[in-house]
Amino acid sequence: MLLNKLLEHKKKEIVKKWFEIIASTYPNDTAGFLKKEKDSFANPVGSTNIQGLGAVLDELINGPDRETITSFLDPIIRIRAVQKFTPSEAVSFTISLKKIIRDTLAREIVEQNLEKDILEFESKIDDLCLIAFDIFMGCREQIYKYKANHVKDRTLKLLQKADLLCEVPDMDSDITPRNF
Amino acid sequence: MVDVPKPEELIKVDNKPPAKGWMDVPPDISAGKYPYPAQPKSLKYLDLPNPRDWSPLDDDWQLPENWKEIVHEGLKERLDKYRSLKVFMDTCVRCGACADKCHFYIGSGDPKNMPVLRAELLRSIYRNDFTAAGKIMSLFPGGKRLAGARTLTKDIIKEWFSYFYQCSECRRCSVFCPYGIDTAEITMMGRELLNLLGINIHWIKDPVSNCFRTGNHLGIQPQNFKEIVEFFCEDIEEITGVTINPSFNRKGAEILFITPSGDAFADPGTYTFMGYLLLFEHIGLDYTFSTYASEGGNFGLFTSAEMMKRLNSKMYAEASRLGVKWILGGECGHMWRVINQYMDTMNGPADFLEMPVSPITGTKFENAASTKMVHIAEFTADLIRHNKLKLDPSRNDHLVVTYHDSCNPARAMGLFEEPRYVINNVCNNFYEMPESTIKENTFCCGSGSGLNTEEIMETRLQGGLPRANAVKHVHDKNGVNMLSCVCAIDRAVFPPLMDYWVPGVDVTGVHELVGNALVMEGEIERTTNLRFEPLGDTEGDSDE
């Protein structure tokens, strides 16, 4: 498909613009740092995003397989799920890809009459946004689970400490339902 | 034709944060973004000021009437007392070398988590109240801001509360500062000033008051502490067939052993505790536990110098009462910062104790000549070096291990090689994380300095991201499935952190690995490790 070829061709430019969108969701100083620092250990947020976005775009062009795309999108959303973003702010960058592609391929879309293909591709981006939301909720549920487990664990320990719990002795083997 | 809105118009989310100067951005003190405040009873027990019921969500934090004067006088007193604080306030040239080195900044992206800006929170008040430049500049319109100064307000107190409790005092930033400014100490001063107003957090004050009362953070009574250790001995007997009878409060023992109480209470620290018991039995060490100084950690460090001194003195009082020769300390983080950097001037030198000498190898621990307290990793490394331990590292073959340099032993005492030497002798598969993330450059777990509380789990996960990112690297590249460390807070906080960022990596103390590798005299054939997990080709654990 011609659109896919064009997207392949302009992939680098599109990913760069897409990353700019993500970086711009952070305060100015931080956006600069995320773009500038190339060491992935000094800048895990920047490097996770740039790698993840490239892989996601590849998969959108060539697939997409839901499981594969989830594995590429997960690290990006996982970070945003613990940062100071509302759910919509955390996932909205996926939708920005539509505008980036339309802007980048503006001339080709008209000249090659790609409107139908673009709409098809955009519905893949809609799916991407829904997947992102699933991942986001999964992350949040994981975090709530840690908090809940902590409280449960502590309560159990307090009950044990206060001698309010005792082990139930093993039931005699004769006491089984068939004997009733 | 219908005017179809563009996608970006449909989702009206303004991604860009407003471009404002840092002084104009208020802190986010909403639910989940702050640690719970301390209870009045803890403050009363510790004779700390302004005990009351309050919430950071309240508009009015019920500060004392003369709160401004208290902070001003408190800062003045500390500037006079600590020359370091004055130097730290004056010398920063805002070069930015520290800015992107903080794990909380890297993980959150919040500029006020840059160490330089965290320090500016306090420095701006210092400039305003204590420097000639600040006072002169304030005479001109806009001059104050130009000088980086500002007048203290109640909102600034709230800002301090927010950001001085988003710093784990790990000191990574200080490694990169060309002037050696220790932002951890600035945070400590910030927290001291907040304490003067009665602004403190439950997760620190509760352990401190417990420790002051019962000798450990968890408030474990002496009989319970004894029961817990005996319970470990029962497990050890079931696993190894070896009976261990440790002593408690035994006068005349050669060595007093002190470790964080967290390891008596929470997995996987408990297995590290079992490792100690096995090691001491293996070498026939003449040691005892104190049920009154049953805590290595010192949350006083996260309160004030005075509180740190009070808690630290209990350990030495017990060493004196029991008449031991020296103290052996377990795998703890900030305990070692207190011992190495502050103990000597607070409560030392501990002249009533003897120079620590290993009774097994005869090695003199001259590095501990003044504090008389030796780190267990040094002690065990020395035993291995002298071939005093019978080890079977193959028992740890199902583990592919990496080592997290816990911040305080690494940066506050330079303990780099000993734990690695021990690990390499007790297991066969060890891989280092990248150089920029270990030793003095180590990344914090994100939950130190009293931040290991569940209500700020997101903050902790942000702070732990850079460390987890490096673990993920060796997990993906080398199949690492076990993260070892020498800190009880690490052991408590890494399990959820790993589960979130790097599933498939478990957490252990170094002496748990030692305990599993030790071949004890008269032991039965071991079928499980100290966690009661089957040894050998265990399901799911193997790489194959």
Image (cartoon, rainbow, N blue to C red):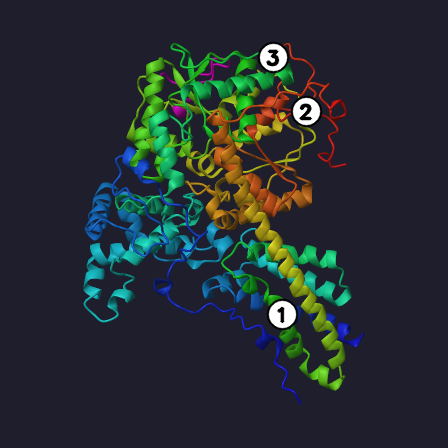
Chain on which label 2 sits: B
Three-letter amino acid code of the residue under disc 2: Arg
- Residue ID at (69%, 18%): A172
Assess whether mark 3 and mark 2 are in contact (beta carbons under 8 angstroms). Answer: no
Q: Nearer the viewer, residue A159 or B395?
A: A159
Front label number (1 vs 2): 1
Chain on which label 3 sits: B
Q: Which residue is mark 2?
A: B395
Q: Which residue is mark 3?
A: B242
Please say whether residue B394 is one of the residues in the magenta stretch: no
Q: Quadrant of the N terminus of chain A?
A: bottom right
Q: Which residue is mark 1?
A: A95
Give the residues in magenta.
B353-368
Assess whether mark 3 and mark 1 are in contact (beta carbons under 8 angstroms). Answer: no
Query: Can the viewer see residue A51?
Result: no
Residue B379 vertical position relative to residue A151 in the rendered view, above or below: above
Q: Main secondary structure of the magenta part?
A: loop
- Label 2 Cα crowd, 10 Å radius (few <14 / some 14-19 / many 20+): many
- Label 3 Cα crowd, 10 Å radius (few <14 / some 14-19 / many 20+): many
Residue B459 vertical position relative to residue B417 in the rendered view, above or below: below
Please say whether residue B359 is one of the residues in the magenta stretch: yes
Alpha-carbon span between mark 1 and mark 2: 52 Å
Kindly give the residue lying farthest to the bottom in the view shown: B1
Count of numbered labels shown in the rendering = 3
Chain on which label 1 sits: A
Alpha-carbon span between mark 2 and mark 3: 17 Å
Local SS, label 1: helix
